[in-house]
Image (cartoon, rainbow, N blue to C red):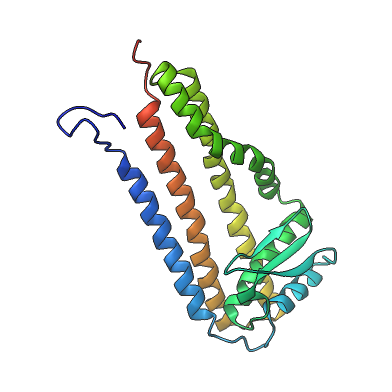
């Protein structure tokens, strides 16, 4: 951005926020991939596949209206509350590893949240449409406001508010994901799908996955801080 002074006219010191956010995301992604790959080689003693474990966990909670389906991709696992489906990736659906069972159980945790009306999950679902619009529209609105009215213009402030919704979404995501993993670990032991040592392995897999959400929140907060520093000051004509 257009910065003057001794550091150079086009130097943007806030780029450090972007770099830090990117590094955090890369480290978290590498950690979850390496941890998953490590424990995807450890076969569960029960011999159950991710799909079989998911169905058993759901049934143990009296949930019979949620289907377990395979989806293509690597670690593309997710629960869809609209279609009531637990969608498991190729490396999870048919795998008997403790890593695969842990990931499948985590997605079942979301289905259980939906079944019990878990408030943070409902809140995240309500925020999703606004967060999607905000993350896409924020930058154009901020730039338009800057060129029309300069730093601190009303349009810039609207853009910053819209981007803040994306930060709120990431913040609400944390308890949703942590709770799903907690439910997964507890039930895998209670139902008897994994032994105590296997649960330790699965806990490491889900813990590494949780770091990706923490990194995503940190990166989004840093991006918001950068936008505030660049565009959120007082108007130049004040």
How many marks can you see?
Answer: 0
Q: Is residue 101 above or below residue 148?
A: below
Q: Quadrant of the C terminus?
A: top left
Furthest residue in direction top, as rendered: 238
Quadrant of residue 50 in the image? bottom right
Quadrant of residue 81 in the image? bottom right
Q: Is residue 76 above or below residue 170?
A: below
**Residue plotted at (61% across, 73% down):** 102
**Residue plotted at (71% across, 51% down):** 118
Q: Position of residue 177 (x, y in %)?
A: 60, 57
Quadrant of residue 215 in the image? bottom left
- Decide if residue 61 is in sight here: yes
Q: Quadrant of the N terminus?
A: top left
Does 209 sit left or right of 193 as displayed?
left
**In front: 26, or 103?**
26
Furthest residue in direction left, as rendered: 6
**In front: 148, or 219?**
148
Q: Position of residue 196 (x, y in %)?
A: 59, 81
Q: Position of residue 192 (x, y in %)?
A: 70, 81
Q: Position of residue 185 (x, y in %)?
A: 62, 70
Q: Is residue 57 above or below residue 168?
A: below
- Decide if residue 152 is in sight here: no
Q: Is residue 124 above or below residue 194?
A: above
**Residue plotted at (53% across, 78% down):** 201
**In front: 118, or 76?**
76
**Residue plotted at (47% across, 74% down):** 35
């Amino acid at each position: 951005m257009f910065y003057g002074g001794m550091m150079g006219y086009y130097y943007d010191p806030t780029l450090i926020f972007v770099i830090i956010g990117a590094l955090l995301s890369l480290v978290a992604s590498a950690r979850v991939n390496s941890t998953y790959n490590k424990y995807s080689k450890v076969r569960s003693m029960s011999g159950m596949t991710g799909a079989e474990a998911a169905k058993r966990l759901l049934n143990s909670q009296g949930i019979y209206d949620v289907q377990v389906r395979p989806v293509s991709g690597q670690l593309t696992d997710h629960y869809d509350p609209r279609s009531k489906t637990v969608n498991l990736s190729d490396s999870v659906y048919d795998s008997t590893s403790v890593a695969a069972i842990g990931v499948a159980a985590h997605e079942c945790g979301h289905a259980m949240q939906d079944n019990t009306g878990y408030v943070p999950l409902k809140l995240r679902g309500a925020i999703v449409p606004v967060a999607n619009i905000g993350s896409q529209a924020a930058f154009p609105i901020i730039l338009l406001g800057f060129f029309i009215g300069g730093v601190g213009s009303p349009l810039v402030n609207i853009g910053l508010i819209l981007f803040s919704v994306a930060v709120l979404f990431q913040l609400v995501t944390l308890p949703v994901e942590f709770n799903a993993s907690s439910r997964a670990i507890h039930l895998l032991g209670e139902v008897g799908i994994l032994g105590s040592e296997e649960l330790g392995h699965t806990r490491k897999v889900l813990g590494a996955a949780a770091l990706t959400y923490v990194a995503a929140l940190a990166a989004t907060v840093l991006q918001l801080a950068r936008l505030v520093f660049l565009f959120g000051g007082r108007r130049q004509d004040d």
